[in-house]
Image (cartoon, helix red, strand yellow):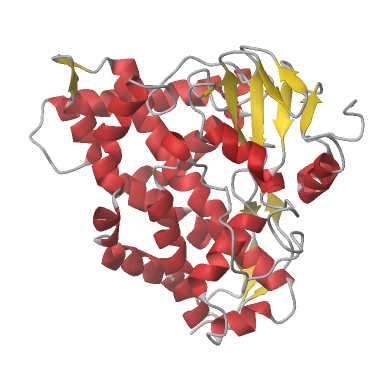
């Protein structure tokens, strides 16, 4: 089927990616998308996306999880490299390690809100959604958080480059961040263990040799970007959606809506990542369509999460919804490493926010973040009489 009716980067579908999901569901299970160079296939049904994510031998990540082909790096690689890098950093993201950060997360959330309570209008993204996860991932790594504005700028450039047809405009920022992180790694190698993940990566050895600079730097960058972007958008999407539907925010603040269930519905309905990519290792048949070897395939999380074969009334936002698990964190060996951290950060930020700001309301819808693969608010102005 031609993709004339589908334009993932149009103003219409960027403003509301559920339009893309509806158009994908109205067509075949496998869609060949030619509006991007290189063109790629799109899978939009839950069962197809799930099958791809559970088959890392046929659908690999080692050529990049964006639409452009890229060399393997860190956890965005395939076994055995992926196994080594994931095992190296996994201890910092296990549930016990994450739960120990709860008091610190609560303190940061309170402190961030303290800075805006007297303002007649403030930006939820800038005041809470962005700084909270950046500060925590800096603490996990053992990096000083005093430069979070610069780190966020670099992180945003990395995210934009992932889904850009031409990543050239972002190369300067990427080089600056790589240089900065490489220098930090060199510094850590000459210092005693400070308990931070950066030192653990700097001191790591594989087959008896220290990690190459490019390997160690790439891994740190992946952790930093993944450690803030998803949570930032989860928080801003949740608040934006709850404030956009009459009565939801007051009911949430009164305790009539379970927080964990609401977060899961937010992740289903407004996934921070619209989708990611895999590359085929061989020609594969999907729904009578042959996807050639060495071809990019987009697993469209948002569309899979709106599949009517799995979710009842899928285009309705229902924070009381129970049932099948969303696919927003992926599945299988590449399931999101920071999933538990993202959910805890969101849980704490939203719990503090509803307690202190029950009369929160939108000034306007703010601004969408730029890259087509991502879904969140870059700006979200709100007003409130907080206490």
> What is the x, y in percent for residue 22?
83, 47
Name the residue: 43% across, 24% down. 176
Q: Residue 223 versus residue 323: which sits nearer the camera?
A: 323
> Does 223 sit left or right of 377 as displayed?
left
Which residue is at a point 15% across and 44% down the rendered structure image? 195
Tell me, yes or no, if residue 48 can be seen here.
yes
13 shown above or below 235: above
- In the shown orientation, is residue 261 left or right of residue 301? left
Residue 300 in view, yes or no: no
The quadrant in which residue 280 appears is: top right
Assign the N terminus to one quadrant of the image.
top right
Residue in the image at 27% along x and 60% along y = 101
Callout count: 0
Q: Is residue 196 left or right of residue 74?
A: left
Q: Position of residue 345 (x, y in %)?
A: 41, 60
Q: Is residue 273 above or below residue 83?
A: below
Quarter location, residue 147: top left
Q: Foreground: 229 or 93? A: 93
Nearer to the camera, 208 or 219: 208
Q: Position of residue 360 (x, y in %)?
A: 61, 77
On screen, 99 above or below 84?
A: below
Q: Is residue 148 left or right of residue 279?
A: left
Closer to the camera in the image, 7 or 265: 265
In the depicted structure, whether residue 102 falls above or below residue 283 = below
Q: What residue is drawn where x is 42% and y is 44%?
A: 227
Q: Position of residue 66 (x, y in %)?
A: 59, 27
């Amino acid at each position: 089927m031609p993709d004339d009716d589908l334009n993932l980067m149009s103003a219409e579908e960027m403003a509301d990616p559920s339009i893309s999901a509806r158009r994908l569901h109205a067509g075949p299970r496998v869609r060949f998308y030619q509006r991007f160079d290189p063109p790629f296939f799109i899978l939009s049904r839950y069962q197809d996306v799930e099958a791809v994510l559970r088959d890392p031998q046929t659908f690999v990540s080692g050529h990049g999880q964006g639409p452009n082909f890229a060399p393997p790096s860190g956890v965005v690689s395939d076994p055995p490299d992926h196994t080594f890098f994931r095992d190296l950093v996994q201890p910092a993201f296990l549930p016990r390690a994450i739960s120990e950060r709860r008091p610190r997360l609560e303190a940061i959330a309170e402190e961030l809100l303290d800075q805006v309570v007297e303002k007649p209008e403030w930006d939820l993204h800038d005041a809470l959604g962005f700084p909270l996860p950046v500060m925590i991932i800096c603490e996990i790594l053992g990096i000083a958080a005093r430069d979070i504005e610069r780190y966020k700028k670099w992180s945003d450039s990395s995210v934009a480059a992932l889904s850009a047809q031409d990543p050239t405009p972002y190369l300067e920022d990427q080089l600056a961040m790589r240089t900065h992180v490489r220098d930090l790694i060199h510094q850590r190698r000459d210092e005693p263990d400070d308990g931070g993940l950066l030192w653990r990566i700097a001191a790591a050895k594989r087959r008896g040799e220290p990690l190459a600079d490019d390997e160690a730097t790439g891994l740190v960058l992946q952790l930093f970007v993944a450690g803030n972007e998803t949570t930032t958008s989860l928080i801003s999407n949740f608040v934006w959606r709850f404030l956009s539907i009459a009565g939801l925010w007051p009911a949430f603040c009164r305790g009539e809506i379970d927080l964990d269930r609401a977060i899961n519905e937010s992740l289903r309905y407004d996934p921070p990542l619209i989708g990611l990519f895999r590359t085929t290792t061989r020609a594969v048949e999907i729904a009578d369509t042959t996807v050639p070897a060495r071809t990019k395939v987009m697993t469209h999380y948002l569309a899979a999460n709106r599949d009517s074969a799995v979710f009842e009334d899928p285009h309705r936002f229902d924070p009381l919804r129970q049932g099948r698990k969303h696919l927003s964190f992926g599945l299988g060996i590449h399931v999101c490493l920071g999933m538990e951290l993202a959910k805890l950060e969101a849980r704490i930020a939203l719990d503090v926010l509803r307690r202190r700001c029950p009369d929160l309301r939108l000034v306007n819808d703010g601004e969408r973040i730029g890259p087509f693969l991502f879904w969140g608010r870059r700006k979200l102005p709100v007003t409130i009489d907080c206490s």
